[in-house]
Image: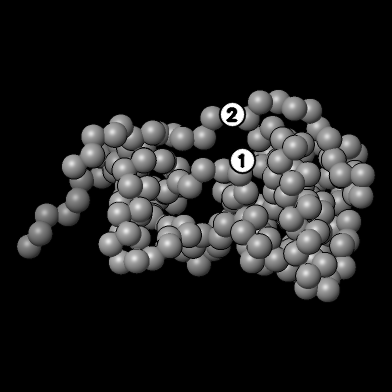
Amino acid sequence: MLNTPLAFPYRAAEAAQGAGGSSEVGYADRHTPSASSQATLNTDRLEEVKKIFTAHLENKGLRKTAERYAILEEIYVRSGHFDVEELYAGMKERNLQVSRATVYNTLDLLVEQGLVSKHQFGRNLAQYEKSYGYRQHDHVICTECHKVVEFCDPRIHGIQTMVGDLLNFHILHHSLNLYGICGDCRAKGASGPAPEPVK
């Protein structure tokens, strides 16, 4: 058994690099991220992501619209997970003219290209997070309040490598979600009414 410690939580804050933006769209120069956006905008990473997205749009014969790039930039200044409504509301807060349909379609394109990850977490509501340039990580989900906590344990990567070697697979990525009841919900349950006795 490996004795590597669990890295929890894994994601360190990115170094502040100022708000930049593509000359093609200039969204980050003109708009302040929404209150729900807490990550620092990494302009170098954002430029790489834009180049990848541009190539993907060109390969599919799709238009490179300002709205699509605005959605991409909004995602890459966010931290943590979000759903479509949170993303849409954050953009409308700042009077950005973007439709729900464009948000949905752009998210599909970004997921398809591997720039955004989509999760279900056992609910009907899909959750998303940016994925380019971020370490592989896994999730613990509370079944009561639906809180999602990220963690990274190098032992899981070791298992992935071992399984790939054993079964002759080149493993591209994995998804591990652990479900339980968080400490806050357990504390609330302990202070709630006593359960009915079983008859």
Query: What's the residue at 48%, 59% (across, down)?
Result: 172
Separation of disc 1 and disc 2 at Cα?
10 Å
Q: Residues within 10 Å of mark 2 (few under 14, many from 20)?
A: few
From this view, report whether residue 24 is shown above or below residue 170. Answer: above
- The residue nearer to you, when weighing 4 against 16, is 4
Query: What's the residue at 33%, 47% (across, down)?
Result: 158
Q: Residues within 10 Å of mark 1 (few under 14, many from 20)?
A: some
Circle 1 or circle 2, nearest the eye? 2
How far across and down, in percent of the image, does residue 99 sit? Answer: 81, 64
* Quadrant showing the C terminus: bottom left
Are the residues flagged by discs 1 and 2 in contact, CB closer than 8 Å? Answer: no
Judge from the rendering whether residue 136 lies leftward or rightward of residue 60; answer left or right: left
From this view, report whether residue 94 is shown above or below residue 167. Answer: above
Mark on residue 116? Answer: none
Q: Can residue 74 be spotted in the picture?
A: no
Q: Can residue 109 be spotted in the picture?
A: yes
Q: Amino acid at mark 1?
A: Ser
* Quadrant showing the N terminus: top left
Label 1 belongs to which residue?
A: 79
- The residue nearer to you, when weighing 149 against 110, is 110
Label 2 belongs to which residue?
A: 13
Query: What's the residue at 70%, 45% (across, down)?
Result: 76
From this view, report whether residue 27 is shown above or below residue 160. Answer: above
Disc 1 element: loop
Query: What's the residue at 83%, 74% (across, down)?
Result: 61
Q: How is the image coloured?
A: one colour
Q: Amino acid at mark 2?
A: Ala
